[in-house]
Amino acid sequence: IAVRPLREGSDPAYTSREGIDDCCVLNSPLVLSDMKVLEPGLRQILNVCTVQKIYFREQASSLLKQLLISVARATALPSTRASRTASQLIRYLQDHYAEEITSELLAAQFNYHAYHINRIMRNATGSTVHKYLINYRISVSKTLLINTELSIERIALQVGFENAAYFSNTFRKLVGCSPSAFRRMRREFL
C-alpha cells in the first residue's frame, strides 16, 4: 500500500511506497483482462487461514506467492490499450487519492468519456472508479490508524474524505466497526 499524505503537516515517515526488488512487475498496478481468475486462489488462501490450525501462515504465504507469480506472468504478456489505460488509471488514483477526483476530471485526464473509464476500470478490477477510490482511501486510513496517533478527523481529511462523519460511516460499512474501534482492536492485537 502506498501511503502518500498530500496535506501539509503530514508525517514524512509514512510517505514511502514499498517496492519489490526481485520482481519489478509487481511494483506497478497489475491489470488482468478478467479479475475472476484470482478468485479460486484467494478462496484457497482464505480456506487455509480459516480451517487449518497448524502452519496456516506458511501455507497461506506460499499460496499468495504462487498467485502473485501467476498474475505477474499474465501481465507480462502483450497488453491491450484498455489494460494500459487501466494501469495508468489505477496509478493515478493511488497517487492522487487525497484530492477531489471527479468523473469529469478523469475523462479530461485520460481523454475518454467517463462511462468508458468506468467500464475499463470495472473490467480490470471488478469495481467502479468510485468504489476503487473509496476502498483505497479506507485501506490507507487503516495504515494511518494503526501506525500514527493522528486524530480520526485528520486522517479523514488526509485520505481525501470531505469530513470525519462521512469517513466514519464509510469505514463502518466497509470494515464493520468504527475507525476508533479498529484502532483500539489492532493495537490490542499487536
Image (spheres, grey):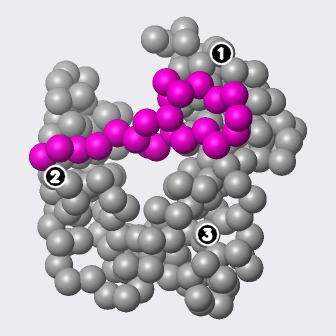
Question: Which residue is denoted by mark 2 in the rendering?
Answer: 23
In the rendered structure, which amino acid carries the disc numbered 3?
Answer: Val
Question: Which residue is denoted by mark 1 in the rendering?
Answer: 149
- Count every numbered label the image shows and give the total: 3
Q: Is residue 186 toward the left or the right of residue 51 in the image?
A: right
**Mark 2 secondary-structure assignment:** loop
Q: Is residue 132 above or below residue 16?
A: below
Disc 2/disc 3 C-alpha distance (Å): 27 Å
- Upstream in sequence: badge 2 or badge 1: 2
User: Which mark's residue is nearer the viewer, 1 or 3?
Assistant: 1
What is the x, y in percent for residue 109?
A: 61, 78
| Residues at discs 2 and 1 in contact (Cβ within 8 Å) | no
In the rendering, which numbered label is found on residue 4?
A: none
Q: Is residue 188 toward the left or the right of residue 21 in the image?
A: right
Locate the N terminus and report the quarter of the image it occupies: top left
2 is within the stretch colored magenta: yes
Stretch in magenta: 1-22
Q: Give 101 or 44, whichever is nearer the viewer.
A: 101
What is the x, y in percent for residue 93?
A: 56, 61
**Mark 3 secondary-structure assignment:** helix
The answer to whether residue 128 is visible is: yes
The answer to whether residue 135 is visible is: no
What is the x, y in percent for residue 10?
A: 64, 29
Which residue is located at x 50 percent, y 71 percent? 89
5 is within the stretch colored magenta: yes
Which residue is located at x 17 percent, y 24 percent? 55
